[in-house]
Amino acid sequence: MRRIAILGSTGSIGRSTLSVAESYPERFQIVALAAGANLDAASEQARRWRPRVISMASEPDADRLRARLKQAGLSEIEVLYGPAGVVKIATHSEADFVVSAIVGVAGLEATYEAVKAGKIVGVANKECLVAAGELITAEARKQGKPLLPIDSEHNAVHQCLRGGRIEEVERIWLTASGGPFLNMPRSEFSSITVEQALNHPTWKMGKRITIDSATLMNKGFEVIEACRLFHMSPSKVEVIVHPQSTIHSMVEFVDGSILAQFSVTDMRLPILYALTYPERIQSDMRFPVRDLRHLDFSPPDMSKFPCLRLAYEAAEAGGARTVALNAADEVAVAAFLEGSIAFDEIPRIIEGTVAASNSGKLGSIEGVLQADAEARRYAQKAVGKLSGAGRARATSFI
Ligand SMILES: NC(=O)c1ccc[n+]([C@@H]2O[C@H](COP(=O)([O-])OP(=O)(O)OC[C@H]3O[C@@H](n4cnc5c(N)ncnc54)[C@H](OP(=O)(O)O)[C@@H]3O)[C@@H](O)[C@H]2O)c1
């Protein structure tokens, strides 16, 4: 029986993990859950799964959840809150497997603490690997525990790597759907609406990662994630646009053999792989191979999607540069979602913030969080200037 704690249980990955657990009750037990602000979902999950402990992002929400659980006769479920609450979920003594699926740097500390506590960690939260991947992977090596990628591309690479040794790898090929604007001329990018950007062609995901997929920053993060997880230099990780998203990624070996992984586009499959690794177990997620007709590939256009170029540059520089990359993206995407900046202003905010950051190595999680806070302040100011200029432009037309 695998005893699971989920960080980000109310999100897209968190719910998919619970759906996998639902399908295999004899294999998986849910012992701890961490939610953000979705009180209804957290309350429903607590009633369904009866975890030992559940955490909310804020104290008032934790109070409300406690009251609801009391009313439902479930006072024995402990309710925590805030970053300290998430760390307690991540290090809970009864959990042996932690699914890291909080979005953004908010999940960093707890993910690191889970690794440090010797848990097996299934990592969906790519931002924590972008910001502090070197520290997290070093700690996992020290603990002798695997870090299992849930991100579909890295999960595919992990599977392909079972076909050879890491020294035998020539190159990792990360596939990218290209997002909803693959064929849109760049001149139209400034008028892209939030609704258009949230309409991903192949995957249904949280808002941040969906916008990151539209700018290709998601793929840039994945390049950094691959470098960190598989100890590769950025020059050995190549992105290839593959609009069908059938092949989830490939590994090319020194002898010229290329292993690819393909399967249905359903996140429950990489989650199941991680939860049962090193075993494979029966599932009903079948790919209709006979229906497969063609697979398209093309190189990414980095001038149209500058976020991918910025990610490669930050990956080469390392240290605080990748922290700034993620922090600036987090701020810029939030500003785009709330209508303060245009779609094509997202890379501008990121480029300016990364250029203003250090490239020095960061030796601790505290150092990473400090660099993250500095970059966020810088990016926030840049958003303020741009949105101020945008308002001035808009009012001058009235
Ligand atoms: N979705 C995918 O298919 C996919 C694929 C690959 C990788 N990933 C990665 O997996 C991570 C999660 O993605 P997602 O699509 O599942 O995102 P999502 O649907 O937006 O879910 C995010 C989760 O994080 C929680 N959360 C946010 N801020 C928090 C805080 N301060 N404290 C505690 N919990 C907090 C949210 O809680 P509330 O909802 O309760 O506020 C929610 O449970 C991201 O890093 C993403 O890049 C996702």
Image (spheres, rainbow, N blue to C red):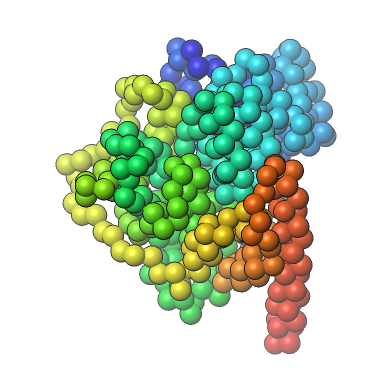
Up-down: is 185 above or below 26? below
Where residue 308 sits: x, y (%)?
48, 63
Answer yes or no: is residue 186 visible.
yes
Residue at the image position 45 percent from the left and 12 percent from the top: 26
> In the rendered view, does 110 fall on the left or right side of 150?
right
Camera-nearest residue between 333 and 48: 333
Answer yes or no: is residue 250 visible.
no
> In the rendered view, does 267 fall on the left or right side of 36?
left
Where residue 272 sits: x, y (%)?
42, 28
Quadrant for ligand 1 reads: top right
Where residue 394 sits: x, y (%)?
70, 81
Where residue 274 sits: x, y (%)?
44, 29
Camera-nearest residue between 18 and 299: 299
Residue at the image position 50 percent from the left and 52 percent from the top: 224
Up-down: is 80 above or below 221? above
Extreme residue in the bottom direction: 397
On the image, which quarter does residue 66 sit in?
top right
Residue at the image position 53 percent from the left and 70 percent from the top: 192
Camera-nearest residue between 391 and 89: 89
Residue at the image position 57 percent from the left and 43 percent from the top: 134
> In the rendered view, does 49 fall on the left or right side of 63?
left
Up-down: is 310 above or below 108? below
Q: Where, quadrant-wise, is the C terminus in this rendering?
A: bottom right
